[in-house]
Amino acid sequence: MKLTTNQKLAAVAIVIVIGLVIAYFSIGSSVKSLNITSQDNVPVQQYMINRLQVPDNVSAAVGSGLGKTLQQVNGTNLTYNGKPEILYMGAEYCPYCAAERWPLTIALMRFGNFTGLEYMTSSATDYSPSTPTFTFVNATYTSKYISFVSVEMEGNKVVNGSYPSLQNPNTSETAILSKYDGPTSAGRGGIPFIDFGNKAIDVGATYDPYSILDSYTWNTISNNLYNASSLQSEEIIGQANIFTAQICSIDNNTPQSVCGQTYIKKIEGNIG
């Protein structure tokens, strides 16, 4: 059958469109893999800080989502500057730390503010390479209700055969890590490690960074958080809500604008 001129043009147009679609996804993938590390240590812009403050109607729709419950412990109250302390210990190279910083950052921002928060990617040669995340190395956290202490122990790029040392835990922090995250305990001995006032601990990532964060950018992830049915929202907001409820349980449920939310109270009621 002989094609008319219009039919030939239409066929050519279809081929071009298909080619452009293939090129788009190929370029998009390569841009992520090749250029995402250029954001390392770039200050997080205010618009992204705003994006991480997911509204209550979305958070309420997620609830605990696919988040994981925390291990409850009964240690001596951990405080800093007279306020309940949340202690985070991790490393920039660690893809599991990269995953856990998302819900932790979102939860902490409900109680205070970060300055100096920077973008970061996990190691390009580890599992889930170059996972987009944040780093607490140069960040300062202020809150009327809680204290946040972070120890990012190593960087994300190998130098002379190893990851460079960044921050060293003090004697007290080392003792806490050894007590609750010691290698002799079942399932212990890993990072990230988060201690909520010596009343609950979180060891390791609560979700898989590869399946939830790989091939995404910060903008895409933050946009997906606003869709309560997305996997990113179910995992990240769900875990942020669990972290939030845990913090409320150790800081006398303040502020009420956070701890008084029905979905947070429901999660807190299941703690312990």
Image: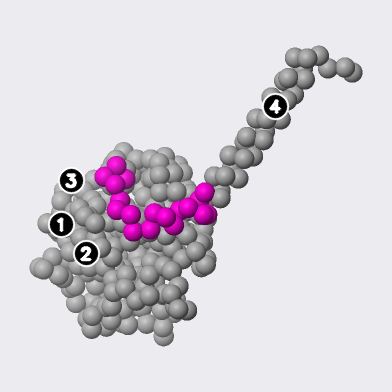
Which of the marked residues, 3 or 1, is nearer the chain's N terminus? 1
Mark 3 or 1, closer to the camera: 1
10 Å crowding of disc 2: few (<14), some (14-19), many (20+) = some
Which of the marked residues, 4 or 2, is nearer the chain's N terminus? 4
Mark 3 and mark 2: span between their CA atoms?
A: 20 Å
Mark 2 and mark 1: span between their CA atoms?
A: 9 Å
Judged from the image, the secondary structure of the residue bearing numbered disc 3 is helix
User: Mark 2 is on which residue type?
Assistant: Phe
Mark 3 and mark 4: span between their CA atoms?
A: 54 Å
Which label is found at residue 14? 4
| Residue 80 drawn in magenta | no
10 Å crowding of disc 1: few (<14), some (14-19), many (20+) = some
Q: Quadrant of residue 56?
A: top left
Q: Residue furthest front?
A: 160
Give 169 or 26, whichever is nearer the viewer: 26
Pointer 2 with pointer 1, Cβ within 8 A: yes
Give 226 or 12, whichever is nearer the viewer: 12
Which residue is at a point 10% across and 68% down the rendered structure image?
82
Which label is found at residue 143? 1
Mark 1 or 4, closer to the camera: 4
